[in-house]
Image (cartoon, grey):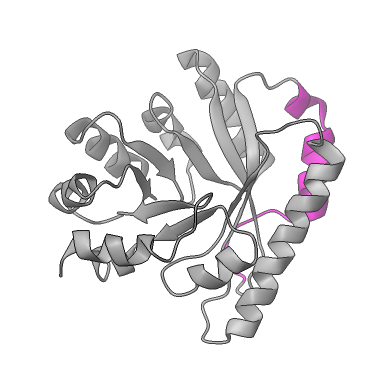
Amino acid sequence: MNIAENLEKIRQTVPNGVTLVAVSKTKPVEDLQAAYDAGQRVFGENHALEMRDKHEALPKDIQWHFIGHLQTNKIKYIIPFVSLIHSVDSPKLLHEINKEATKKGCKVDCLLQFHIATEETKFGLDHDKASAMLRSDDYKAMQNINIVGVMGMATNTDDMALVRSEFRNLKGIFEKLKAEFFADKQDFAQISMGMSGDYPIAIEEGSTLVRVGSAIFGARNYNI
């Protein structure tokens, strides 16, 4: 497996204006360095401590995206350096991110994660919960978070028509939130959807961030 060659093939399918997030969870630092040497600068991780350790070991111009379910007691480990948190799935989590960012004196970009799949195991908000949160006094008082878009995970299925409809649903949620809450906010512009098996469809449906792991690094090692 050649990581540089894999990256080059994928880049040829990702248009300008769409960011390729190399999902490097469970992969060794050497694999990330190989991707870095091939020009990749945006990496996605789903464990806070693993991301912290990789940040310490790798070049400092990497943009680190947190893409997994974030436990509130682990937020403090990534706040100082994280570029974007994709997975804000509750008012409590957003509150805790703001609290830790306030302590560190920084402002953190976040995406709201929506539940768009048929599987109940996936995390995420629905439109009503998100709207209630964005109207709340607690949210309006938050000075250290910056919501810049939405994220969603499609159903794990071979039914690409279903996947496309779920991506289209997320794009619709993004447009509703933009109109209602972020009309004057230019940086509310990101839609994170699409992974190794379905990112071309996600791009067709409006994705601006695609999260590609196995197509770059090979199958994930679940024993770590």
Query: Is residue 118 among the parts visible in the rendering?
Result: no
Q: In this view, does 171 lie to the left or right of 33?
A: right
Q: Residue at x 51, y 52 (%)?
A: 18
160 over 95 or under it: above or below: below
150 over 220 or under it: above or below: above
Front residue of 48/59: it is: 59
Q: In which quarter of the image is residue 160?
A: bottom right
218 over 162 or under it: above or below: above
Q: Is residue 45 left or right of residue 93?
A: left
Q: Residue at x 57, y 66 (%)?
A: 202
Q: Which residue is drawn at 50% across and 73% down?
A: 198
Question: Within the magenta stretch, is there residue 20?
Answer: no
Where are the magenta residues, as a range?
Answer: 120-140
Query: Is residue 101 among the parts visible in the rendering?
Result: yes
Q: Is residue 217 left or right of residue 69?
A: left
Question: Within the magenta stretch, is there residue 132?
Answer: yes
Q: Residue at x 49, y 51 (%)?
A: 69
Position in image of residue 92 (x %, y %): 64, 37
